Each structure stands twice: as C-alpha cells, then as structure tokens.
Image: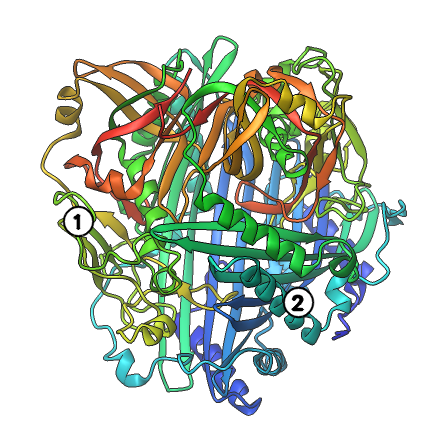
Amino acid sequence: MSDATPLLSESVPRELVAELLAIARSSGADFADVFAEHTVLRGFSYDEKRLKTGSYSVLNGVGVRAVIGEQTGYAYADGFAPADLREAARVAARIARDGAARGAPNAFRVVDSPAPFTLLEPAPLMLDEQSQVAMLRRADDAARGHDGRVREVSISLASSAKRFLIANSDGLWAEDTTYLSRLVVSALALEGDQRQEGFAAAGGCVEASYYERERTPETVAEEAAASAVLLLSAREPEAGSYPVVVCNGWGGVMVHECFGHSMEGDTIRKKSSIRATQLGEQVAARGVTIVDSGLIPHSRGSFRVDDEGTPAQRTVLVEDGILVGYLWDRLNAVLTGHAPTGNGRRASYRDYPLCRMTNTYIEPGTQSPDELIASVKRGLYCKRLGGGSVSPADGNFSFQVTEAWRIEDGKLTHPVRNATLAGNGNDAMLRIDGVANDLAIDGTTGSCGKDGQWKPVGVGQPTVRFSGITVGGTAV
Amino acid sequence: MSTRHLPPGALLAHATRAIEAARAAGATHADACAEGSRAFTVRVHGGAIETLKQSGTLGLGLRVMVDDAVGFASGTDLSPTGLEDLARRAVALARFATPDAANGTPTSAEAGEDFIGDLELFDEAALELSPDAKISMALELERIALSVDPRISRSDGSAVSSSGGSFAIANSNGVARAWEGSSVSAWVVALAEDGPKQQTGVYGVTKRHLADLPSMESLAREAGRRAVARIGARSVPSARVPVLMHPEIAAGWISEMYEAFTGEAVLKKSSWLTEQLGKMIASPLLTLVDDGTLPRGLGSSPYDGEGLRTRRNLLIDRGRCVSFAYDHYHARRAKTAPTGNGIRGFGSTPGIGFHNLYVENGTTSPQVLLSQMDRGFYYDDQGSFGFNPVTGDYSYQAQGFWVEHGEKQFPVDGVTIAGNSLEMLRHIVAVGNDLEWRSSIACPTLLIESMTVSGA
C-alpha cells in the first residue's frame, strides 16, 4: 500500500511560501509562519467478531499565522490552491492594522537537526491490509480465549502518516514526516449481573516488527481481558485520604496533569499558573527530578522538530525538588526573553501552535517498587489509570483509576475498582515521599487536550508513593 | 475561501456526485456526508486581542457497501478526481470487511417526507456579526469580569465566536437532504486571588441566534461570582450526605449516561441498562428526553446523519426506561425502527448520538430545595473524568459548598463524590424548575438523597 504522497514542497513551492509570509506581514506583523500538512489516516475496527469497517482519510491544507507583540492572527485553507492560501495569509495579516509592510522573509535555511531515532520500516507503511486484519483477528481470539467470561471484544488499529512543512519570516524552513500507529483492545467480561470492561493498548512511532517483538496483539488482548475479569471480583474503594502508590509508566499521567500543564509557557507568561512565581523554589519533595523530552525513542510524544520548526530537546523542569525551568513555544519564549524549548505544537494546519508537553516523566530514584508498597500500612496501589484532568489556574486535578489494589500491612490484598484520585497539584507534588528505580515511559497511547487541540504525548515515571491523596469511593 | 460557508444546495451537489462515483467504482450501496463551515473566533486577554482566527472547512465522507460489507473514505478534495479517489479507496477497503445483512442506507420510504417548517437553526445576524463587534464584545466580557470584585485580579481570557455551516446527506436510494445552521458563543474565565492559591470562575453560552445571546454583562458577572465564591475552599470529612446537583453537573451526568441508552451498547450488553427496557429505573419525578426538533436547539436538525427525520424520543418517562436510541444499522440488528440518532461528521461513519438531551422541568425552585436541606453538599463543579459507561459507576473530583440548616456554610474543594447511576436515578428526591439551554444538554437542579463525599 505504498501510496505516493506528493512532496509538500511540490504542492507549496518556496516562492509561494515566501509570498504567503510577505502577505502575512503586509500590514505590520513582526513575525509570520506557514504550516503545510498532508496527513493520511487509516484504520480498521473489529467488533462483535466482525470486521466492521476499514477507513481512509486525507487531511491536507495550509495554515498561516501572523504575530505582532502578544497578538496572533490565524487562518487556514483546506487543500493547496494558491488563491485560497493567499486569502488565508491576507486574513491572518489583519491582526496588525495600519502598520508598514515588512517585506520579504529572510532567505530560507533548512533546519538540519538530527532525528532522535529513525524508523526503517514504519508500521503505518509496512503493514498491509491483510496483515492488519490478521492482527485484529489474533487479538480477538486471544481475548476471548483468555477466559470464558469475556463476552465482547472491540479492537481498533489506526495509523497516521503525516508530512509537514514549516517556514517562517526569520528564514526557518523545516520538513518532516511522522508515523504513528496504535492498537487498542477493549474486553467486556460478564458474570451474573456483574459487567466490567478492561482496556489495553500498544503503539507509538514504531517499526512494523514492534507488533511481533515487543507487544503482540495477543499480549495486548490478554491484558485487556485479564483486567476485565479481575474487576468482576474487585471491591469498591474506601473513601478518604490515605497513602497511594502509583505504578510506573502510564502512572506518569499524574505528573503530566498535576504538574506539567502548569509549567507551559503561555500560562507562565500570563501568570495564570500558580507556578509562574515559583522559579527556584522547592515544589516537590527532595529527590524528585522532572523532565520533558521530545527525544524518547519510539514514543508518540517524540519528533525531530516541533510544529514551529524548533528541534526537540530535553528540558529539566524540576531538579531535586527545585523548580528550574519552564516549557516554551516560540511566541511565549520571545515575549519573556527565553529560548524556545521545542514545545510549540499544533493538532493540525487548522490550529495555531500552543505550548504543549512532549514526553513528561519523573527520573528514577533508588528504592525498589516492592519496598514502596511494603512501606504502606493501609493504602492503595494504582495499577492501571484511565483519564485525568487538571484546571491549571487553580491546580485541582483528578484521575480515574481503572484497576487498583488495596494495600494492608505492606501487602496487596484485593483488587479495587472505580477509584478516583483528586487533589491540588501544588500540594500533591510535595506529598511524593518515595521514588522507585523502575522508570518506564509510556509512549503508546497518550493524547493530551488543550483548547480543543489534541496532541499525542508520552508520560512516564518510576513507581511513586504519595503520603496522602483523596481517594473517591462509595464505602465510608 | 470566502467568509461564507457553501450553501446547502451546492454542498448537496458534491454529495450526489460522490454517490455517482461510488456506483462507478463498484459500490452496491453508498451514502455521502458533506460539511462546509466557516467560523471566526476572537480571544482577548489582558485588555487586548490575543488571537483572531478564521476557520473554514469543506469535506466529504463516503461510506460504501459492496455485498453488505462496509468501506469508508473521507477527504477535502471535492474535485471529480478527488471524489473518484475516495470512491476507489472506500470500495477497496470494503473487500476486507465482514459482510453483514444489517448494513445498508435508508430507503426513500424510510426517509419519509421532507421536513416542512422552520427549526430556526440559521440566523443571518449571527453571521453578520463583524470581527470588530466580536472584539468589543470580548473586551467588554473581560473588563466587566475584572470589575466584579477587587479580589479578581486577572482573567484567563474571554472569547466570542460565530460560525455558519451547511450539511448534506445523499445516498444511493435517492435520499438527498441538506440544511444549514449558525451558532454564536461567548465565554470568559475570571481568576480570584486566594492567598497562595487562585480560584477559577468559568461561564459561557452558545446559541443559534445572536438575539438569544445573554448580555456580556450578565455572563461576566456570573464568571466573576463563581471565582469569588470559591475563595477559602477547603475539604470536609468523608460522609454519606444528600447532594444538590447544580444544573451543569446534572447535565454532565445525563450526557455521560446517554451511551447506556444507545442501541449499540445494549446489543453488545456493554450497557448497564441492557435488561432494563420497560422497567422503572429512576424516580417517578424524572423524565429524560432527546429532541432533535426543538426550535433554535443547538443540537436540532431536520434530519440525522443518515438523512432520516429527527424526532422527539422519550428515554425515561416518569421513571420508566421506555426506549433506546438507534441509527439505521443498529435498528436493523435490533429489528426496530431507527430513531433519527445517526450522528456523523464528514470524517467518520455514523454513530449513535443525541440531539438535544434534557430532563423535563420540575416544580420546585433551586432556592427552596437548598433551604430545605438540613446538612449536605451543594455540588457545582467537577473534574473531567469519573464515569464508567459500562457499569454507570460515578466518581468525580468535586467542588461546591457545605450546606447546613438550609444555607451554604463555606466553599469545598479537594473532595470526590461517588455513587452508582442506577441508585442515583432511583434516589432523585426533587427536580428543580430551573431548566435553561446553554448548549445541547440541559437539566434542572437535582436533589439526590444520598451520595458519598470523600475528603480529608
């Protein structure tokens, strides 16, 4: 299925890009950029033992941004018709009024930063339809075969191939292609009047062989099935505030929500984040180091250059408990006198860039995960987390814990379902009182939403202990 | 790229051509959904414009059936070669899908007569609202929010936007339908200082008609009031108490519950209502309705995403579960009639969704409900995740007020609130009379006899 997609620089040649940048700055804007994209999305959904449908979607077009001071004008056009693109540039230019035209952009220089990793045989290109359908059937068989109580299985396999071009009035020019793939299995288990669902996923910026060597359809399906079956016998959580140990890998969604969002440069510049005044202060327990890095191999949150053309980098946010740096997109970096950190990201050409996380994680400590659990007299071990959210201005966060275990006298005693963790990010980060040595970064499935824009991200951490978090439940 | 969306007739011509392309590519049945929209959004922060954004979308999705198996393709190139490419790809993908006799598209007989009348979905004034008018509205929103109280020292921005769009559906049985609508919305976020903390007050409204938009002053005052009311919020000890649900929280709950009413979840037995049709599942005080025909409703449309007429569907009638919602495919599977709930955008195949989902008004004012509460929780803000669609289990991070002797005592945060939807539905002891439409979901204040608040 090698579909020859047109080179973007053929659809949007340099002369046209230069013209669009000049139009965007024709009424006084001090900066402009052009983002062109051609994305192909493919997917199969398998449900009720049927291959329900195969789908193919193309998303292509160009967005033009004009910036003057703190102000942004943005417009986009679907497709690459030069007349539509010029109109988009004229609309974006209107953010600046009555100013002088800034003329032609600087001569283009190609951003040649190295890729953090390379894909030889990307899954979205190499897996043909027959192999994808075979993977879905294998996952369905494995989930149903795992336990007779698994009564329904839904599986989706989706991929994207995104080619993009970014150029700006400073003369930056960057082109790249990113490939993402994701397999998601949901299993429904029924027993008497009990009904529970389990999920598992695999994927990232992966090679086709990943699904045979690292996470096979069977592995993913059995995880989903095992979780659903386990939850049939789980108990409701005890309501209250008590010690909580959160698993490594996907458990890092806690640090993403509790902390990462409040470190994004837009909220720092505008001082709507409580973190804006905390540079140099202790914001987490000693021993806690927090990093955002776009360089993690094969994670969904990684890339060579961000959606403004800035090379991906590793940014330390907290070192040994002290807040040492923030995340910056270009606009907020320029306005505050910082250098962009490779965190300017947009969902597509239909959106202007926002300051966003890439892969955000806590560095490993020295204890073993078993030691952390053994140290808790009465608490909760969170093994599988679902979605989470935060309100960055007030710091209130919450997470769904889809599968947890009760800890009694340092031992896991019984499974717990439907726990929700809640609290304030400022407070929760200071309550981390144990960091294990088992760092894992989950770059398979995370998507982060901000202002209606969804972007793939990675999250990670070693097993972490919080001295106390409010756990929602129905048992008092 | 003009500032106006493509008119419905022109859009329908694209959809009809896509059906011809699908037939030529070998499809036995096909339907096409085309969307064209234009939007303009102004965001303001700190007394100045932050962003001006113009959006324009024109796209088409083509669902084909080849021997009862489905393939789908979508894109934004509506030229003859673009449509031929989509048709060829959709037909090729259908070869991999499992044939299923329930696949199909509505016949002219199923689609019925054309809708005659006016749902008042389109407002010329909303589209003619100029960028400058939007800018001054957004500036006013922020300025007034900042003036509500000296403790509101900054905003997290305000926004005003308007959009217009057309929607067209055509299928190989000759069904061809198109319509258009508009919307205009405004919101603002006020931030109040609270010692080392900061409190958020968010308020906004979306309407079809500009004339229905409340004054900027009333929106801004509500956002400011919300931020200030949170100052000094603290946790409370865990307890099982009566809970008075603010309309926004109640609306969030009914929209999460909707999935359990979809024919798809019921057929798969992944709905906690699977065995409940015809049974009393809620307090007799509760009637839950989905109505696609409400004049000026944000979720209203004359037809659904498969070209079928929309209707008013009773889901819960005075406590009894009386119907589920279906698109064409799942209705055939369940051997029942579609309910006009096939919902889709051009980029995907239809799924089952609601139009305007609401609980019918009760008789008691929310003030009276509060005054009758001896000790409990007034629940008016929440986190984003906390609902289990398979079990109906409910557990959210919550904010609100502690209530004693019929009065709010102090603001509360750092707690969660939990229960199970079936139990919560049965324990609704009062329904307020304050139903108000601010989006496509609405619910009056609900009083629930007992839920678990988990705190310090």
The amino acid at mark 2 is Met
Return the x and y of residue A475 as percentages of the image width and height: 36, 27
Image quadrant occupied by the C terminus of chain B: top left
Quarter of the image for the N terminus of chain B: give it: bottom right
- Check disc 1 and give the amino acid type: Thr
Visible residue check, residue B214: no
Q: Where in the figure is residue A71, as x and y percent of width and height?
A: 61, 35
Residue A375 lies, in percent from the top left, at 63, 18
Placement of B112 over or under B293, stated as above or below = below
Residue B225 vs residue B341, the one in the foreground: B341
Label 1 secondary element: loop
> Which quadrant of the figure has residue B110?
bottom left
Instruction: Tell me the quarter of the picture where residue B91 sits.
Output: bottom right
> Which residue is the extreme one toward the left?
B363
Query: Where does label 1 land, which residue?
Result: B287
- What is the crowding at mark 2: few (fewer than 14 residues within 10 Å), some, or many (at least 20)? many
At x 64% / y 72%, what residue is drawn? A133
Q: Which element is circle 2 on?
A: helix
Q: Nearer the viewer, residue B37 or A170?
A: B37
**What residue lies at 34% left-to-right and 33% top-to-bottom?**
B216
Relative to B323, is A26 on the left or the right? right
Q: Are marks 2 and 1 in contact (CB under 8 Å)?
A: no
Q: Which residue is mark 2?
A: A135
Find the residue positioned furthest to the top.
B195
Comparing B27 with A290, the one in front is A290
Examine the rendered structure and indicate whether residue B405 appears above or below residue A127: above
The chain that hosts pointer 2 is A
- On screen, residue A276 above or below B128: above
Observer-nearest of A197 and A63: A197
Name the side, left or right, on which A405 lies relative to B394. right
